[in-house]
Image (cartoon, rainbow, N blue to C red):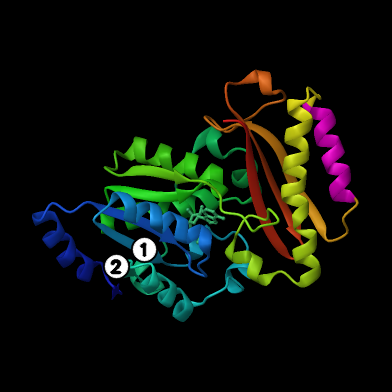
Amino acid sequence: MQVLKTGAEWQKIWLQSLQSQKIIGFVPTMGALHEGHLDLIRNSKKSNDITVVSIFVNPIQFNNQEDFDNYPSLIKEDLALLEKENVDVVYLPDPQSMYPEKPVLSMHFGDLESVLEGAFRPGHFSGVGIIVSKLFNIIRPHQAFFGQKDLQQVAVIKRMVKDLSFQTEIITVPTRREEDGLALSSRNLRLSKEERDASLILIESLNLAKNELLAGKDWLAVRNQIQQKFEDEPLANLEYFELINPDNFQVIESIAQSKASSICVASYIGNIRLIDNLPIIP
Ligand code: AMP
């Protein structure tokens, strides 16, 4: 496994891999790796000759300084995990080389970011779009792997790839969960025992709402019921619980309103902000 700090080092390997017609898979991450990240890596290894994993905590996608300052960093453990997965290349750029200057560019994704994460985290998707563009320009992968857990991020990146003609295929990988249903997330490391217990409210609410919807209950009644459930949990502070059309990320009020539908949730548990989603009709 090669650990690279600069794009120039990768450029040499990239040129050689091109000559031998190797297909490159790429998994961008912010580290503190868990089985969800490893699923993306295993998928990449299945369909690519070379798998590159980046670890970079991207400052410009955080709209909350405290969240950035407290984001877990476990480089030694991460590298050991990646070695075990037989990853070919790890790209570990430092912030100074990635952002010699604060970018003046910003990206806007129109209706795709007018709700949910886009609405609650102003500037977040601009930061995501800029870092993913930079990484795609440096790595030039044939395929890149993203988790369904960040559903709106996948929609934004697919659109960016289309609008900017990136020659990278975007592959979405299903959400990996703990046995009790909690979606794996690097931020889970920061949950206390009580908060970990309380965090199950996300997946329990998603499952409950899905069952109620499929049993024919009206969405607004379902959402009221869920909002009450969150109000009854003192450690939870709900930001949104919305039914959306995953094709255009528009909020809908009935599963009959679009061909596909998913429910998306974001809630603070204590000081930790967690998100999750569940397809209702895939
Ligand atoms: P992050 O390190 O949180 O920026 O995530 C890096 C990639 O891993 C993103 O594409 C995430 O959507 C994906 N990811 C995070 N958690 C999970 C999970 N539980 N299951 C599958 N993919 C995930």
Identified by mark 2, the residue type is Val
Q: Is residue 270 visible?
A: no
Residue 14, percent from left and from top: 18, 60
Q: Is residue 164 above or below residue 10?
A: above
Asked if the residue under mark 2 is in contact with the one under mark 1, i.e. CB atoms within 8 Å, the reply is yes
Of residues 3 and 97, the one drawn nearer to the viewer in this rendering: 3
Disc 2 crowd rating (10 Å Cα; few below 14, some 14-19, many 20+) is many
> Which is more N-terminal, label 2 or label 1?
1
Q: Is residue 193 magenta?
A: no
Disc 1 crowd rating (10 Å Cα; few below 14, some 14-19, many 20+) is many
Of residues 24 and 109, the one drawn nearer to the viewer in this rendering: 24
Residue 130, percent from left and from top: 41, 53
**Quadrant in which the N terminus is drawn:** bottom left
Q: Could you tell whether 240 is left or right of 122 in the image?
A: right
Of residues 112 and 38, the one drawn nearer to the viewer in this rendering: 38
The residue located at (32%, 40%) in the rendering is 164
The residue located at (40%, 58%) in the rendering is 41
Q: Is residue 251 visible?
A: yes
CA distance separating discs 1 and 2: 6 Å
**Residue with the mark numbered 1:** 53
Identified by mark 1, the residue type is Val
Q: Could you tell whether 115 is left or right of 160 in the image?
A: right
**Quadrant in which the C terminus is drawn:** top right
The residue located at (27%, 71%) in the rendering is 6
Which of the 4 quarters of the picture holds residue 113?
top right
Q: Which residues are magenta?
A: 219-231
**Residue with the mark numbered 2:** 89
Q: Is residue 230 magenta?
A: yes
Residue 147, percent from left and from top: 50, 50
